[in-house]
Image (cartoon, rainbow, N blue to C red):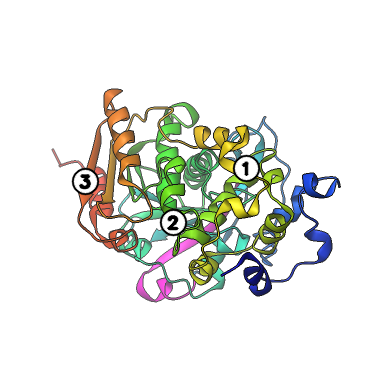
Amino acid sequence: MAVGALLLLAPHVPAAATEGSAAGTGKAFDETRFLPDPSGDPYLDQRFTTTNAMANGTILASRPVTIGAPLALTSHFSAWQIWFKSTDADGAPIAALTTVLKPAGWNGRIVSNNFAIDGLGAACNPSYQLTHTFSIEAPDVTRQLLDRGYAVVMTDYQGPRMAYGHGPTEGREVLDGIRAALRSPDAGLSGPVALLGYSGGGIATVWAAQLHPTYAPELDLVGAAAGGAPTDLGLLPATMDGKPPASAFYLMGAFGVARATPEALRLLSPVGAELAARFKNSCVHAGLLFGPAPIPIGALTDGSPYDTDIAKAILRDTRAGQQAPRIPIYFWHGIDDEFIPLSGVRNLAQEWRARGVDVTLDELSCGGHVTCAFVPNGIQAVDRWLAPAPAG
């Protein structure tokens, strides 16, 4: 499918919002045209004034919420949504949101379920999906955790700019979402916490684990389980850039990471800028619909983006491993993963082991990237870490 045909099928945006890159038009560059629109829920669309003087995880607002089907039909729990203070990747204060689910038979343990958001719009976040849609989580990790008695923290970890795939942003918000959940008088939570995530959620999990010792050392984290995790974005062009069926997800990820990187959006050509503006609110369904389109990122930029200092800095700064976790790490990854190369997690596991981290990597014959999400290994690791200490 040609870029022009994709633009014809994409949602329309006003011409003023798609004037192309500053380099291509000579006009002042306005990156706001690439940022997500409000979700339409007044509570989720609130804006708060935050300062560096506020402690990270400080609660800004909270409300009880009703979670929709199918989760509400299969599990019994109470739920709250909590706005809290966090920081972006550059340390600037921001506000973020988390959803906390506490089962009726809570077992005194907590799991940060870093759901793979896979989208650029505010309506892609779990806070919106759980309360406004018939939200089918596949696999149904949240239900399995609630049925085991765990309280579940599901944070909108991509920030107000919806920086899809940007680990330095995501890890901070995961940790501050846990802080906020523990400070909520309504939820009344305390106790050990495990991290869990697959694919895009694996990015958030890995970065939360490695930032934990310096960013949130007081949190009682007991382990992090990440499956199919893209630990090195520099490996993905060979398997995803312009290569169906993952090419649309790659473009969405490129747009998301660029949102968190000064000057990166200026690399877009006029056609690329129009596409980025039209798809700025897209969720996973857009990736599935347009995945067969073999459009490489180079078709949307002025020249090869990989040769620029900006792109090189992005790939350097988003590569996991710059810090060492202090908690056990469990990786599972499909040997035949067609999207996320196994070499990335192999390299990271080796680096962290050399620095004294307790790392387990299970390389599984579980099929492709999607099917490997359904193996129970991640939840089994959580069960091991969060098992109650034997009496006596």
Q: Is residue 177 left or right of residue 391?
A: right
Q: Dividing the picture into quarters, in which one does residue 33 lie?
A: bottom right
Q: Residue at x 25, y 32 (%)?
A: 358
Q: Amino acid at mark 1?
A: Ala
Image quarter of the N terminus: bottom right
Label 1: how many Cα within 10 Å (few below 14, some 14–19, many 20+): many
Q: Is residue 306 above or below residue 279?
A: above
Label whose residue precedes the other's in the sequence (2 or 3): 2
Q: Earlier in the sequence, mark 2 or mark 1?
A: 2
- Residue farthest to the right? 27
| 128 left or right of 148 in image | right
The reply to whether dot 2 and dot 3 touch (C-beta < 8 Å) is: no
Residue 189 visible in the shown view: no
Q: Nearer the viewer, residue 27 or 162?
A: 27
Question: Looking at numbered disc 3 in the image, what kind of residue is underneath it?
Answer: Asp
Q: Helix or strand or loop: what does disc 3 sit on?
A: strand
Which label is found at residue 362?
3
Residue in the picture at 20% in, 41% down: 389
- Secondary structure beneath dot 2 equals loop
Q: Are marks 3 and 1 in contact (CB under 8 Å)?
A: no
| Three-letter amino acid code of the residue under disc 2 | Phe
Image disc number at residue 115: 2
The magenta segment is 68-84
Instruction: Say if the magenta span includes residue 83.
Output: yes
Q: The C terminus appears in which quarter of the rendering?
A: top left
